[in-house]
Image (cartoon, rainbow, N blue to C red):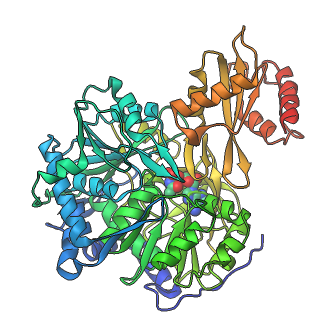
Amino acid sequence: MSHDIYPVLLKDTYINQEQYKELYQRSLEEPEGFWKEQAKKYITWFEPSEKVLQGGFDLLDVVWYAGGKLNASYNCLDRHLKTHADKIAIIWESDEGNSKKITYHDLHREVCQFANVLKKYGVKKGDRVCIYLPMIPEAVVAMLACARIGAIHSVVFGGFSAESLHTRINDADCRLVITANEGMRGGKKIPLKANVDTALVSCPQVQHVIVVKRTDNKIDWQKRDIWYHEAMQIVDADCEPEILDANDPLFILYTSGSTGKPKGILHGTGGYLVFAAMTHQLVFDYHPQDIYWCSADIGWITGHTYVVYGPLLNGATTVIFEGTPNFPSPSRFWEVIDKHQVSIFYTAPTALRALRQEGDDWVKKTKRTSLRVLGTVGEPINPEAWEWYYHVVGEDRCAIVDTWWQTETGGIMITPLPGATPLKPGSASWPFFGVEPKVVDDKGKEVADGQMGKLVITKPWPGMMQTIYNNRERFVETYFKEFPGMYLTGDQAYRDKEGYFWISGRSDDVIKVSGHRIGTEEVESALLCHPAVAESAVVGVPDHVKGQSIYAFVTLKTGYDNSDTLKKELIDTVRKEIGAIAIPQTIVFAKGLPKTRSGKIMRRILRQIANQEVDNLGDLSTLSDPQVVDDLIEQVKKLS
Ligand code: 7RM
């Protein structure tokens, strides 16, 4: 395995290669001292913690910064006011191409006001608030207002359906929902408020819905609805931040796993914020004069940590982009970069692959001279897309950071640092400070360099989730049961001789479609909602733009025939049950599915069939009906 290595380009960064090695060593050898310093450096505490790290993975009793007192919104806002109240906190770039700038002073004021609105409608410390908003400044205001009063926000991505929203509102027992009348994306309207109304049909605990007016269109109005702009007029602008414990929860964010319904990943306050601020500063080499833009939606963890908390903790100017990469043209990203003089840009490989496909001219007609650091996240980046980012977008002058992390990890775990790490296209490279990843075999034994295995993290880090909301059992079972004492990431990887990690994808039944994390079982359950479907099995197949796409095998109940109409109905069912992001690219109607004699569907075989890798299907003798395999191979061939 030989790979091109690109030397480190940037000078005068916070961390050079020598410093990385030294500090990394220290962070593992002396975690308490190391993380105590970081806590002091990055966060303003009302009271410092008595104990930096308590417990460990053995007993699963990890507690970070026990006894420390702080407030997230105070750290993102108030503490910056003395020195730079007039600095721009948010540059909002709307779908239509308008922009709006909000200073730290103004953002602070709006957050305080909205915190008072929440209080007025009965929201108290520890209550859960659901946020179902487009990418507008009010989304940040809502998150920070919750944090200010100690309420726990649960942001639900605006692309999820009413049904998904309903499940999430109920699982977290949210008391209040914040939405917009409509969202705007790529010139299309999204009926957010109408979805909320549908979702709330059986959520009696939700007494109030606060509605931001994003468009001029009329919507249905319920007795429980309150206009955001009206509510804001009748509250005052003073709201003292609640003094919270480091281990009071900050937010819940739902994410898909290999089984069952989505898990509410619960993050605490102290550890999460220290990790968010530190990674944001060092991974992007963020300096006060930078204009920083992460294109992720706030409905995902990347939006939480690197659109909102990380940058605001560091007093940065963060761009909030409502639009899409190719509307009105594939130049949009690069035009926004020129317009706002963005110096740090963080996006997903899937967006880069889609734009690369449109040709270099869309990039080349823009300047991009402000760019210095370019990041990617969400899925492996193939070397071709990496090279394009490096040469065409960054014109060989920008550092690329391919950052590996998860909803569960809270922040970036494996990544180059701009001034420290020689780059290998396609590798997320070296672990961040305090993070000790290993690659192990099925028994949990570390494998040799160059050998593929399961990626685990062996030591606690401050950004790690606290638990799965209301489901401690599932937390233990999912992440710590297979290899006691280690955190199981669910990813496959190998480490090369120079210590670079190469993460190839999931080793469980989770797929990443355009960087969106989807559990195959969720799609299967959605398909089963259609009366014609007897059984379904869903696998991921490689897609040259989306990374992976969804491939569904379906058997029908007697009395139903396959047809294009039925296919459309199945697609509509998935759209309704989950959202457009989970729609299968291909649906194969099968006579039967390959099963073991005990009735277990053999996904490995289905994956191979979907990928048309059928030369070596392995031992089929354990199948209850080996015949079905030939039929499936036939069907798949016909479709391709
Ligand atoms: C941040 C985020 C997590 C899963 C993770 C991986 C995949 C993310 C990379 C990556 C290879 C990367 N959170 N993943 N980043 N794979 N290289 N740089 O995406 O919870 O939604 O997904 O995403 O499989 O387990 S997530």
269 vs 613, left or right, is left
**Horizontal and vertical percent position of residue 543:** 72, 50
Q: Residue at x 58, y 53 (%)?
A: 515
Q: Quadrant of residue 347?
A: bottom right
The image quadrant where one finds the N terminus is bottom right
455 vs 304, left or right, is right
Residue 564 lies, with reference to residue 174, above or below; the image says above
Residue 612 lies, with reference to residue 319, above or below; the image says above
Q: Foreground residue, 637 or 476?
A: 637
Outermost residue toward the top?
Answer: 559
Can residue 594 be seen by looking at this rendering? no
621 vs 474, left or right, is right
Q: Count the marks.
A: 0
**Horizontal and vertical percent position of residue 611:** 79, 42
Q: Quadrant of residue 624?
A: top right
Q: Residue at x 36, y 31 (%)?
A: 197
Ligand 1: quadrant of the figure: bottom right
Q: Foreground residue, 446 or 241?
A: 241
Outermost residue toward the bottom?
Answer: 12
**Horizontal and vertical percent position of residue 223:** 22, 30
Q: Foreground residue, 202 or 547?
A: 202
The image quadrant where one finds the C terminus is top right
**Horizontal and vertical percent position of residue 203:** 31, 27
Residue 84 lies, with reference to residue 474, above or below; the image says below
Can residue 380 be seen by looking at this rendering? yes
340 vs 500, left or right, is left
Q: Residue at x 52, y 30 (%)?
A: 577
